[in-house]
């Protein structure tokens, strides 16, 4: 059985309160990555057939780098570490001000 990852950019997700300091404003909805790295699908026997999602919040710096990623919520702990490791490698277009961004990564198993 092959495992794959589907990245769902849930830009309209809302969460009760922000976990990143209020000094950083929300990113505009049109924010899109210029470089992405897919999380490795967890290889543990328990996770091989597991599907789920991870909601993340992170800061996008003026140079487009991702910093301070945090898990807001997830369907399984199996997906959290691989999601954090991958999102730290993402890059966005340079911007005039740092901003706070939220998204959901969705993990699905291919038959």
Image (cartoon, grey):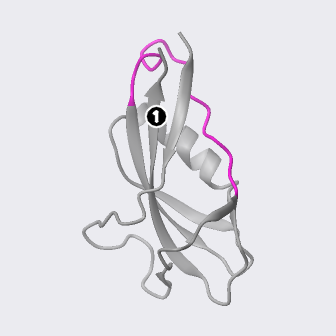
On the image, the x and y values in percent for residue 30 come to: 53, 74
Relative to 109, is 67 above or below?
A: below
Does the magenta portion include 39?
yes
Span highlighted in magenta in the image: 35-51
Q: Residue at x 61, y 53 (%)?
A: 87
Q: Is residue 14 visible?
A: yes
Relative horizontal placement of residue 100, taking residue 95 as reference (left or right): left
Name the image quarter holding residue 95. Answer: bottom right
User: Label 1's element?
Assistant: strand
Query: What secondary structure do most residues of the magenta stretch adopt?
Result: loop
Label 1 CA crowd tier, 10 Å (few <14, some 14–19, many 20+): many
> Image quadrant of residue 78?
top left
- Rendered location of residue 97, percent (x, y): 62, 88
Q: Is residue 87 above or below residue 13?
A: above
- Magenta residue check for 82: no
Q: How many marks?
A: 1
Residue 109 percent location from the top left of the image: 46, 22
- Percent coordinates x, y for residue 106 in the rendering: 44, 41
Looking at the image, which is closer to me, 56 or 77?
Answer: 56
Q: Is residue 13 above or below residue 3?
A: below
In this view, 85 is above or below 60: above
Residue nearer the viewer, 43 or 110: 110
13 left or right of 1 in image: left
Q: Residue at x 51, y 38 (%)?
A: 6
Q: Is residue 8 left or right of residue 86?
A: left
Q: Residue at x 47, y 41 (%)?
A: 80
Q: Which residue is mark 1?
A: 107
**In the rendered image, is residue 42 in sight?**
no
């Amino acid at each position: 059985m092959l495992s794959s990852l589907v990245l769902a950019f849930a830009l309209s997700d809302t969460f009760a309160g922000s976990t990143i300091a209020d000094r950083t404003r929300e990113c505009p909805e049109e924010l899109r990555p210029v470089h992405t790295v897919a999380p490795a699908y967890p290889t543990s026997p328990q996770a091989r057939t597991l599907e789920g999602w991870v909601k993340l919040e992170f800061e996008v710096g003026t140079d487009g780098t991702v910093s301070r990623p945090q898990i807001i919520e997830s369907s399984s702990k199996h997906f959290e570490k691989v999601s954090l490791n991958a999102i730290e490698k993402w890059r966005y277009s340079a911007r005039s001000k740092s901003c706070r961004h939220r998204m959901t990564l969705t993990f699905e198993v291919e038959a």
